[in-house]
Image (cartoon, helix red, strand yellow):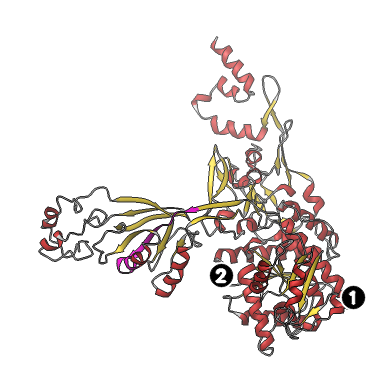
Amino acid sequence: MSQKLVCNCNGTMALDPKTLGIPIHRSLCRQEVGSFLKALDGSEELVVACTQEVALFGELAAQADKPLVSPLRFVNIREVAGWTQESNQSTPKIAALLALAEMPQAEPVPVVNYESQGRLLIVGAGSQAIPWAEKLCDSLDVSVLCTEPGDLPLVRNYPIYSGSISKLDGYLGKFSVDWDLQNPIDPEMCTRCGACVEVCPENAIDLSFQIDLNKCKSHRACVTACASIGAISFDRVDRQRNSEFDLILDLRADPKMRMSQTPQGYFAPGKDPLEQALLVNQLLEKVGEFEKPKYFTYNEKVCAHGRNGKVGCSACSDVCSTGAISSLFKGGQGSVEVNPNLCMGCGACATVCPSGAMRYNYPSVVHQGKELKALVTVYSAEAKKLNQALAPSLLLHTLKAGTQLIDGLGRSAHVLPKQFEGLPSFVIPYGIEHIASTGLDLWLGALSYGFSEITLLLSGEEDPAYREALKTQADLANAILQAYGFDARVHLIEAHSVSDLQTVSKAMGILRQRGSLAALCPPASFGLSLQKRETVEAVLEYLQKYAKTPLPEAGVVLPKSSLLGGLTINKDACTLCMSCVSSCPEGALLDNPDEPILSFIEKQCVQCGICAQTCPEHALVLNPRLLTVEQRKQKMVLNETQAFHCISCGKPFGTLKMVDLMLSKLGAHGAFSGSAMDRLKMCGDCRVVDMVKKET
């Protein structure tokens, strides 16, 4: 247990101490701060229901004589409950949020390390890059790459290069830059003596120490003047340059990296001086050793990326906005490779992964499931005491940006209640590291625990691919729910930015006017699993139990993006060569060692499509659908045919159809006439014996 300190913020929140079962303070951060100091001397963990004064309470705790039992925990009840139009009905939500703050912390995850020595490359026009280099060269190990000429300083305090970037990749502490030296003058070798400037008859060289090739008439007087230095060459063959840096400050108007979400250590403020100044301050803080969480876990064994040289599922690499995920094939077997240094922790890869091979781990779905179960259980129990709606709505949001939006909405609704709608009393916000990290298993799991609906709050900073992925997954979730006779329960609110309060306010007003929905089913008791497919299967079985309408025998069609589904086979085209069996990464397709039978277990299929691509006869087509749990568990026969028996020993070694097809294709060839044709009708052992006999 922990000690909770709750304040009504100078009487601006209608909090009932009897209903909540704890004392309510009025000015915990001012006149009643002594209560906080007294609580610091206790032996319990401390939860403070105030996020506005985090800095103050943290400073007081740091100055206390007695060390804390555990770090302070803070929970916001003001903007999300106490400052809303339904504050007098928000006691169940407040109780649930306080209970969430008491939950155990997630297990720590491995970390990814960075080391930066401050080697900075400033890229851009010389007129902008060089002034910043002059300011930063005393603090950082600066180099400059001038993409446009600019007057060079006469004192060589730092390297200056020129040219255009051909390749730029890497991350904090390990950037690699390739560029092409395009001008005859190499500024790295140039001593800026000015001899070339003096002798040039066309004035094609100025204090940028670059030759204006539009003015140059190829007198080569500059080459002669620079002979002892060797910085000028019109016939330079090797123009490629490469170097490594820890940090990049890219001042180009159109900076180009191969990913839309750039890695740590790369700063691209453009040409705006204010933006440049703000990011330069961050640059100075990026020297030393750093670490971040390793957000993901990858299980190659269940990955459906590729087999037999064929690419099946590439959902994770397609959605990744940082370029952290790449395809890897070894011996025909495909997997993906993730660079943890480039991963920014969005979790979209895990959201779209059909097999669960890519798993988000910060925190895990298991931990989130326990927190959601605590939220809905406490809310429902408190709501029942007050005869209120028992099923809360879950509002998922990115921890930082979403909190900023929700807090801004709460303040606005408190000051201007006629213009802004705060969160309804039945809407519980739940912050996660990134909204893209949440997917089908968590949403359906939350609904099975008793939440009435799931709302995803997009705050405008998400990569377009993430938004599209969430919409696609939400459509799939709703299609599954509708297959069981439920209405759509997964929705999106698409704000344009963290200051777009009107969009969120409008959505909250619609929810408030509609009122709380009933839960789909009684609260489930199972826990969410680390394995995505395992969680989805458990939820499907539970929802089927409480379905409003039974699934038809033929199942219900699902969207093409579905991770659930079966296969349609063209039996006339299929030769039962079993190449599909060897290609299936999940073991959904099975052969029979004794008979030519192709079987299928739908529960194992992740709709990766490798089997359809591998089939030489193009006889297989994916069939995204939802069957009953019992049907999906059964092994069903897709195709079977009569076996072809060896004409010598009688052993079956192929299908009649496959051998007939082979004979028809090879029969006209001269190499397979006479006894050679008969050998095609033999098993491998008899074929060898027959060849030896004929030769002797």
Quarter holding residue 106: bottom right
Along the line of sight, which residue is nearer the eye, 196 or 478? 196
Q: Residues within 10 Å of mark 1 (few under 14, many from 20)?
A: few
Which amino acid type is shown beneath numbered disc 1?
A: Lys
State the residue position of label 2.
461
Image location of residue 424, percent across then percent down:
75, 79
Residue 129 on the magenta span: yes
- Most extreme residue toward the front is 65
Bounds of the magenta segment: 115-131
Q: Evaluate whether residue 488 shows in this view.
A: no
Image location of residue 51, percent across then percent down:
68, 74
Q: Secondary structure at mark 2?
A: loop
Q: Quadrant of the C terminus?
A: top right
Q: Residues within 10 Å of mark 2 (few under 14, many from 20)?
A: few
Quarter holding residue 98: bottom right
- Most extreme residue toward the top is 696
Relative to residue 142, is residue 64 drawn left or right? right
Q: Earlier in the sequence, mark 1 or mark 2?
A: 1
Image location of residue 616, percent across then percent down:
58, 41
Q: Which mark is residue 25?
A: none
Q: Residue at x 49, y 25 (%)?
A: 670
Q: Is residue 344 above or below residue 6?
A: above
Q: Secondary structure at mark 1?
A: helix
Which amino acid type is shown beneath numbered disc 2?
A: Glu
Residue 418 on the magenta span: no
State the residue position of label 1.
385
Along the line of sight, which residue is nearer the eye, 477 or 462? 462
Q: Residue at x 70, y 78 (%)?
A: 29
